[in-house]
Image (spheres, helix red, strand yellow):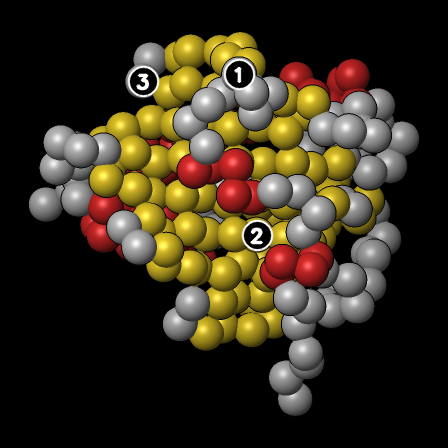
Amino acid sequence: MLVALPSLAAAAPLDLAQFTNRDDTSAGWKQFRQVGAVTLWRRSVTGSSYYELRGSVEVPVAPEIAAAEVWSSITEGDMATLKRREFLRRRADEVVIYDQINTPVVSDRDYTVVIRRIVDGPRIQFRCITVDGIGPPPQKGFVRVPIIRAGWMVEPDGHGGSRIWYFSYSEAGGNITALIARGAQADRAESDVTRIRDRILKRKP
């Protein structure tokens, strides 16, 4: 039996429309890392000790091809840290998944998220949020991640290729402090954007 899922807009307090805002200064974004073709920004979140992260990279591939690879990456679960994935729902433009993630040094994490693919004119968005009351309860040996607001956006770069945006806000849960978690989150953002870029370039026609 299918369960009713929460509205994406109602469940996500963060403004995901930020990715169409190129005025980085007024939006609070500050660039903090450049690794090869990958650029990373961060900004403070009111009432939180964690940063919201954003990354971007350009690839010489049409947006529809790049977007297809992003969706394949999401649904295949090609993250190196993934220990277990259970699909609770699979539809053409929506998946609900329960993940268990290996996190070195600290306890492993788990979460249930809904991921939706949204076509917004020339842009294709993939929005991910944690959901409660769906999927397995907290498992022994794992710490439940309380908040994930993340996703990707693919848009034309104006030169026949694609600009890929990554965004993420999450809280680690458990006893780990934000000061410790923020470095790992930034490294993860860089790794994720690089992984998607490499995947697209490897499979481009």
Image quarter for residue 82? top right
Identify the residue position indicated by label 3 in the image.
Answer: 37
How far apart in space, not on screen, are marks 3 and 1 (Cα)?
21 Å
Residue appearing at x 77%, y 62% in the figure: 132
Image quarter for residue 36? top left
How many residues crowd around disc 2 within 10 Å: few (fewer than 14), some, or many (20 or more)?
Answer: many
Image coordinates for residue 44, horizontal then vertical, percent: 69, 22
Helix or strand or loop: what does disc 1 sit on?
loop
Left or right position of 15 against 181: left
Helix or strand or loop: what does disc 3 sit on?
loop
Mark 2 or 3, nearer chain start: 3
Three-letter code, disc 2: Cys
Residue appearing at x 77%, y 29% in the figure: 46
Using the image as rendered, state which of residue 108 and residue 196 is in the foreground. Answer: 196
Identify the residue position indicated by label 2 in the image.
Answer: 128
Identify the residue position indicated by label 1 in the image.
Answer: 25
Is residue 97 positioned above or below 178 on the image?
Answer: below
How far apart in space, not on screen, are marks 2 and 1 (Cα)?
25 Å
Three-letter code, disc 1: Thr
Q: Does the image show residue 42?
A: no
Using the image as rendered, state which of residue 1 and residue 105 is in the foreground. Answer: 1
Image coordinates for residue 34, horizontal then vertical, percent: 42, 11
Residue appearing at x 75%, y 36% in the figure: 171
Image coordinates for residue 144, horizontal then vertical, percent: 80, 48
Three-letter code, disc 3: Ala
Image coordinates for residue 163, horizontal then vertical, percent: 29, 34
